C-alpha cells in the first residue's frame, strides 16, 4: 500500500445555496484500480465527481490529483492532465456528428496522427459508432450515446476516468456490454472511479467501494466484502 | 472595470473638419472614471469588511428603529404617508407641486409596469406605448367630442387595455426574451403611427387644446345648480393624480395578494411547472399585460389633461427605459420600492440640474450596477410564505 | 422595371448590412441565450470609430493618396476596437450574471446599451457626424439603374466577412469549440474548453462584424449619429429571429430578407412607415413559425 494515490479527496464540502451537498467526503483512488461510489439518489455522488472536475467549487477541503492540488483550478485545465469525466446523462453534443463529438474529446490535443489512431481504437471498441460517424449525436439511441460518451472521453487518453451512472436508462444487455468495455479500458491501464446507483454490477466490477449517504462516506471496503455485507445487501441490493 | 474605461477612451471629441479636441470628452470620462473608482473602492472595502465601522452605528440605530417600527402597526405608517401626501400642496410652491405631480404619474406607470415585469416576469420595453394610447385617447375625445375627463378616463383605460390585448395576443406565446424585443418594436410602431397619421393625430405637431379635468360643484347662488369648474390650478390636479395613484396602489396590492397574483409569480418562476399545475398561463399573461396597460392608460389620460398638449415626443423608448429603471432600481414586485424608485428618479435629476446631460448615462450605469450587486432592488419584495432557501439547510 | 431592379440592388446592400449586425445577435444568443441589447451600440461605436479614423486620415492627407488603404485600415481598427469593447462589456455586465435570472441579465444588457449610447452622445455630441466625402464616388449606370462604387464596395466587404465567418465557425478548431460551448457549457469544460474565453471571443467577433456594418452605414448615408444603433439593432434582431436564432446561415438570410422588405416596402407602399415593415415581419414570423425559417440552434427553450 505504499503506492502514491492518483486521486485523493480530503474532507470535501460543497453546497448549493444554503443546502449542503457534501459534508466532508474523503476518499483515495490508487493507480490501476476500479473504485466505485455507490449510494442512493441525492446522496451527492454526481456532486463529488463535479467537484473533482472543478465544475462545482469547494467550500472546504482539498483534492489532489497525482499529488498536485487541483481544487480551485478551472475545469478546462484538467482534461489535458489526464483527468476526464463521462458525466451523468452522457451529455453528447446533440448537433455535432459522431465524428465531431469524438474530435471534441481530443480538443486540447494537437497530434493529428495520434488522434486518428485513437479514433480507430474507439471504433474498434464500439463498431456501431463507426457506422454512425456522420450522424448527429442527438439522433443516437441511449446505449449508443453512452458508448459515444465513453469513446469521447477515451479520445483524451485519460489516466483517470470518472464515470457517472453509465448504466442509467439502459437495457440490461447493454449495461452488461458497457461494463465489459469498462473492464477492458481498465486493463489497458486507465484508472476508473465509477459512480453507480446499480450497486450490484458496480461492486462486481470494482476492486474497492465507498458508500455515500447524504453527503458523507459511511462505509469503505473491498468491493467483495461490501457485496457480502448484510446492511448493503438490504439497503442497495434490494434483499430483505 | 478600468479596462472598459480604457477602451472607451478613444471615443473622443472630433470636429467635422477632422481636427481632434479632447476637452469635452475628457471631462465626461473624468466624471465616469471618478464615479467608477468610488464604486469600485466601496465594493472592495465592503468585501474586506472595512465598512463595518460605517455600518455599525447604522446597525445600532436600525435595531431600535426596527423595534419601534414593529410596535406601530403598518397602517399607521401608511396613514402618516397618506396624510403627508395629502397636505403636501399646502406647503409646496408651484415648482414643488409640479415635481410631485410628475412623481405620482410615474408611480402609476411604475406600478402598472410592475405587474408585467415584477409579478409576471415578462420584460416589456414598449410600455410607454400604452401611456401614449391613453393620452391620445383623452386628447382626441376632448378635442373632437368635448368629452369630459372623468368620462374619458374609463374610455382611455379601455383603449389602452385593447391595445395591450392586441399587442399581447400574438406576442405572449413566445419565449420571454423575444417578448422584450417585440414589445420594443411595438412601442416604436405606436410612436411611428402617432407621428405619421396626420389627419388624426396632427403628426409631430401634437394635439393642442385639451381640456383640464372638470368638476361639478353645487352652486346655491340664485337657486340650486351645478357649476362646471375646470381644475386648472396645479394643486387641484395634484389631488386628481393622488387619487389615481392611491387607486393604483390599492389595486396592485389587491392583485398582488390574490390568487391571480400568486399565479403570476408561479409563471415568473417556472412557466412550464405553472402550466402543469393547471394555471392557464396564456390567459394570465395576457391579463397581466392588459392590467399593466390599463394603469398606463389612466396615467396617460391624466398626463394629457395636465399638459393640455400631447405629441409623440413624449412617448419614446427612453421613457419606457426610465419607467423600467424605476421598477428595477426600486425593487421588482415591491410597491414601496417602486414608489421610492419613482421618487428618486424624478427628484434626483431635479436636484442635480447641472448634470442633466448625464441623466441617462447614470440611469444605464445604475441599472447594470443594481443587477450586479442587488438584483432585488432597494426594497426587495417580500414574498408570501416561507421557502427552503431562507433557512440554513 | 428599372425601379424594381434599382430597389433590388439597394435592398441587397442594406440587407447585407443587417445581416452583419444580425450575426452578432444570433451568435451571442446561441451561446449564452441572452439578447445583447448593447449590440446596436457596438454598431454605432464602429460607425463613430470610422468617422474618427477617416477624418484623421483625411486631415493628414492620406485619403487623397491612398483612399482604399485608409478605408481598409479604418475598417480593421474599428473592428478591433469594437471587439475589445464588447469583451470588456461582457466581462463587466454579463459574465457576473450568467447564473442569475434571465430578467436580471436582460435588464443589465439594457442598462449597458443606454450607458453606451449616452456615453457616445456625451463625448461625440448630439448632432450628426458627417463622413469625409469624396470617397468612392461615381458608379456604373445601366440606363436608369445606378450601382455606385460604394454599393459594390459594401457588398464585396460584406460577402468577404460572411465567408470568413463561415469558415471560422464551421471549419476551424475555434469554431468547433464555439459550437460545442453553445450546446453544452459544462461538457465543453469537461473536454478542456475554456468556455469563458469562447464566450468572450463570440462577443468580440459579433461586435467586430457590427463595427464593419457601422462604418458601411456611415459611408452609405454619409453621417453617423449616437442613436443610430437603436432601430437597426431591433431590425437586425428581427433578422436573426427570422432566420432562426442561433443559426448563422439563417441570420444572413434573415438580414437580406429584412433589408429587401424595408426597401420594397418604402418604395411601393409608404416611406414613412419603412421602420414598421421589419417589425411586422418579426411578429408574423414569431407567430406562425417561432423557430424561424431555418430552424433555431439553441437548446434551452425555457423562458
Image: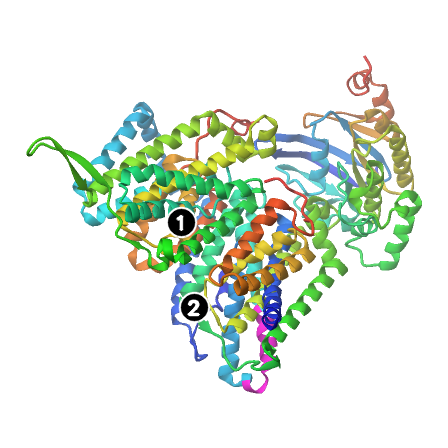
Q: Magenta segment: does it hold B124?
A: no
Residue C113, x across and y down, in percent: 49, 55
Q: Nearer the viewer, residue B246 or B221?
A: B221
Bounds of the magenta segment: C64-78
Marks 1, 2 in one chain: no
Query: Residue drawn 51% across and 71% down?
Result: C221
Decide: is C238 above or below A127: below
Q: Assign a secondary structure to mark 2.
A: helix
Query: Residue drawn 59% across and 26% down?
Result: B277
Image mark for residue C97 = none
Q: Which residue is mark 2?
A: C124
Residue A44, x across and y down, in percent: 69, 30
Q: Magenta segment: does it hold C68?
A: yes
Question: Chain letter of disc 1?
Answer: B
Residue C205, x across and y down, in percent: 63, 61
Question: Chain letter of disc 2?
Answer: C
B105 relative position to B114: left or right: left
Residue C231 visible somewhere in the drawing: yes
The quadrant of the rendering that contains the C terminus of chain B is top right
Q: Assign a secondary structure to mark 1.
A: helix
Amino acid at each position: 500500500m505504499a503506492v502514491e494515490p492518483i486521486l485523493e479527496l480530503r474532507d470535501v464540502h460543497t453546497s448549493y445555496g444554503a443546502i449542503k451537498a457534501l459534508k466532508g467526503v474523503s476518499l483515495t483512488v490508487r493507480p490501476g484500480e476500479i473504485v466505485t461510489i455507490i449510494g442512493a439518489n441525492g446522496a451527492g455522488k454526481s456532486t463529488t465527481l463535479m467537484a473533482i472536475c472543478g465544475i462545482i467549487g469547494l467550500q472546504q477541503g482539498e483534492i489532489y490529483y497525482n499529488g498536485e492540488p487541483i481544487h480551485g483550478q478551472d475545469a478546462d485545465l484538467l482534461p489535458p492532465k489526464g483527468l476526464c469525466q463521462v458525466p451523468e446523462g452522457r451529455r453528447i453534443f446533440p448537433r455535432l456528428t459522431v465524428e465531431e463529438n469524438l474530435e471534441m474529446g481530443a480538443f486540447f490535443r494537437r497530434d493529428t496522427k495520434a488522434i486518428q489512431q485513437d479514433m480507430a481504437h474507439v471504433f474498434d471498441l464500439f463498431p456501431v459508432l463507426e457506422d454512425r460517424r456522420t450522424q448527429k449525436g442527438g439522433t443516437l439511441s441511449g446505449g449508443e450515446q453512452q458508448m459515444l460518451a465513453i469513446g469521447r472521453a477515451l479520445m483524451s487518453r485519460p489516466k483517470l476516468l470518472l464515470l457517472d451512472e453509465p448504466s442509467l436508462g439502459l437495457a440490461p444487455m447493454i449495461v452488461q456490454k458497457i461494463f465489459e468495455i469498462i473492464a477492458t479500458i481498465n486493463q489497458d491501464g486507465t484508472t476508473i472511479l465509477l459512480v453507480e446507483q446499480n450497486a450490484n454490477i458496480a461492486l462486481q466490477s470494482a476492486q474497492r467501494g465507498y458508500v455515500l449517504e447524504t453527503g458523507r462516506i459511511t462505509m469503505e471496503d473491498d468491493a467483495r466484502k461490501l457485496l457480502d455485507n448484510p446492511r448493503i445487501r438490504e439497503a442497495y441490493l434490494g434483499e430483505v | 472595470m478600468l479596462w472598459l474605461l480604457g477602451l472607451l477612451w478613444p471615443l473622443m471629441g472630433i470636429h467635422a473638419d477632422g481636427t481632434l479636441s479632447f476637452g469635452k470628452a475628457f471631462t465626461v470620462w473624468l466624471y465616469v472614471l471618478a464615479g467608477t473608482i468610488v464604486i469600485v473602492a466601496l465594493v472592495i472595502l465592503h468585501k474586506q469588511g472595512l465598512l463595518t465601522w460605517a455600518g455599525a452605528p447604522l446597525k445600532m440605530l436600525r435595531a431600535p428603529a426596527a423595534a419601534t417600527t414593529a410596535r406601530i402597526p403598518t397602517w399607521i405608517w401608511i396613514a402618516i404617508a397618506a396624510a403627508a401626501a395629502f397636505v403636501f400642496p399646502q406647503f409646496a410652491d408651484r415648482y414643488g407641486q409640479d415635481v410631485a405631480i410628475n412623481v405620482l404619474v410615474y408611480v402609476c406607470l411604475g406600478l402598472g409596469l410592475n405587474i408585467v415585469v415584477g409579478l409576471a416576469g415578462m420584460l416589456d420595453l414598449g410600455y410607454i406605448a400604452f401611456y401614449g394610447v391613453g393620452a391620445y385617447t383623452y386628447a382626441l375625445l376632448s378635442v373632437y367630442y368635448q368629452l369630459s375627463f372623468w368620462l374619458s378616463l374609463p374610455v382611455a383605460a379601455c383603449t389602452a387595455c385593447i391595445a395591450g390585448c392586441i399587442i399581447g395576443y400574438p406576442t405572449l406565446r413566445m419565449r420571454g426574451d423575444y417578448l422584450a424585443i417585440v414589445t420594443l418594436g411595438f412601442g416604436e410602431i405606436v410612436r411611428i403611427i402617432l407621428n405619421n397619421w396626420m389627419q388624426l393625430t396632427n403628426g409631430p405637431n401634437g394635439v393642442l387644446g385639451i381640456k383640464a379635468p372638470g368638476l361639478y360643484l353645487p352652486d346655491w347662488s340664485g337657486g340650486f345648480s351645478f357649476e362646471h369648474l375646470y381644475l386648472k390650478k396645479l394643486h387641484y390636479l395634484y389631488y386628481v393624480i393622488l387619487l389615481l395613484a392611491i387607486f393604483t396602489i390599492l389595486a396592485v396590492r389587491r392583485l398582488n395578494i390574490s390568487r391571480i397574483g400568486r399565479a403570476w409569480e408561479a409563471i415568473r418562476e417556472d412557466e412550464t411547472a405553472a402550466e402543469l399545475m393547471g394555471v392557464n398561463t396564456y390567459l394570465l399573461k395576457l391579463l397581466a399585460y392588459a392590467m399593466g396597460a390599463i394603469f398606463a392608460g389612466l396615467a396617460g389620460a391624466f398626463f394629457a389633461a395636465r399638459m393640455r398638449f400631447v405629441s409623440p415626443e413624449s412617448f419614446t423608448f427612453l421613457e419606457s427605459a426610465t419607467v423600467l429603471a424605476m421598477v428595477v432600481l426600486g425593487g421588482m414586485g415591491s410597491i414601496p420600492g417602486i414608489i421610492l424608485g419613482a421618487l428618486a428618479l424624478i427628484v434626483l435629476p431635479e436636484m442635480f440640474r447641472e448634470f442633466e446631460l448625464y441623466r441617462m448615462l447614470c440611469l444605464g450605469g445604475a441599472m447594470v450596477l443594481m443587477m450586479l450587486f442587488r438584483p432585488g432592488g432597494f426594497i426587495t419584495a417580500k414574498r408570501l410564505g416561507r421557502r427552503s432557501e431562507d433557512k440554513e439547510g | 422595371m428599372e425601379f424594381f431592379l434599382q430597389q433590388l440592388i439597394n435592398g441587397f446592400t442594406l440587407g447585407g448590412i443587417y445581416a452583419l449586425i444580425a450575426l452578432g445577435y444570433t451568435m451571442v444568443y446561441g451561446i449564452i441565450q441572452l439578447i445583447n441589447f448593447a449590440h446596436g451600440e457596438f454598431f454605432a461605436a464602429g460607425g463613430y470609430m470610422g468617422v474618427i479614423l477617416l477624418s484623421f486620415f483625411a486631415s493628414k492627407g492620406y485619403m487623397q493618396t491612398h483612399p482604399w488603404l485608409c478605408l481598409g485600415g479604418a475598417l480593421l481598427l474599428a473592428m478591433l476596437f469594437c471587439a475589445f469593447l464588447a469583451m470588456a462589456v461582457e466581462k463587466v455586465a454579463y459574465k457576473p450574471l450568467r447564473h442569475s435570472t434571465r430578467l436580471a441579465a436582460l435588464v443589465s444588457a439594457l442598462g449597458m446599451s443606454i450607458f453606451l449610447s449616452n456615453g457616445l452622445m456625451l463625448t461625440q455630441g448630439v448632432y450628426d457626424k458627417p463622413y469625409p466625402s469624396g470617397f468612392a464616388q461615381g458608379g456604373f449606370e445601366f440606363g436608369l439603374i445606378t450601382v455606385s462604387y460604394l454599393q459594390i464596395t459594401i457588398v464585396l466587404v460584406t460577402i468577404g466577412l460572411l465567408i470568413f465567418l463561415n469558415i471560422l465557425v464551421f471549419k476551424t478548431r475555434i469554431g468547433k469549440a464555439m459550437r460545442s460551448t453553445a450546446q453544452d457549457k459544462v461538457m465543453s469544460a469537461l473536454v478542456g474548453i475554456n468556455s469563458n474565453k469562447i464566450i468572450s471571443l463570440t462577443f468580440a467577433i459579433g461586435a467586430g462584424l457590427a463595427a464593419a456594418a457601422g462604418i458601411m452605414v456611415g459611408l452609405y448615408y454619409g453621417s453617423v449619429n449616437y442613436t443610430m444603433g437603436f432601430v437597426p439593432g431591433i431590425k437586425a434582431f428581427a433578422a436573426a429571429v427570422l432566420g432562426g436564432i442561433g443559426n448563422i446561415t439563417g441570420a444572413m438570410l434573415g438580414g437580406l430578407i429584412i433589408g429587401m422588405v424595408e426597401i420594397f416596402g418604402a418604395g411601393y407602399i409608404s416611406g414613412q412607415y419603412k421602420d414598421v415593415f421589419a417589425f411586422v415581419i418579426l411578429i408574423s414570423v414569431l407567430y406562425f413559425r417561432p423557430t424561424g425559417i431555418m430552424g433555431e440552434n439553441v437548446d434551452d427553450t425555457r423562458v
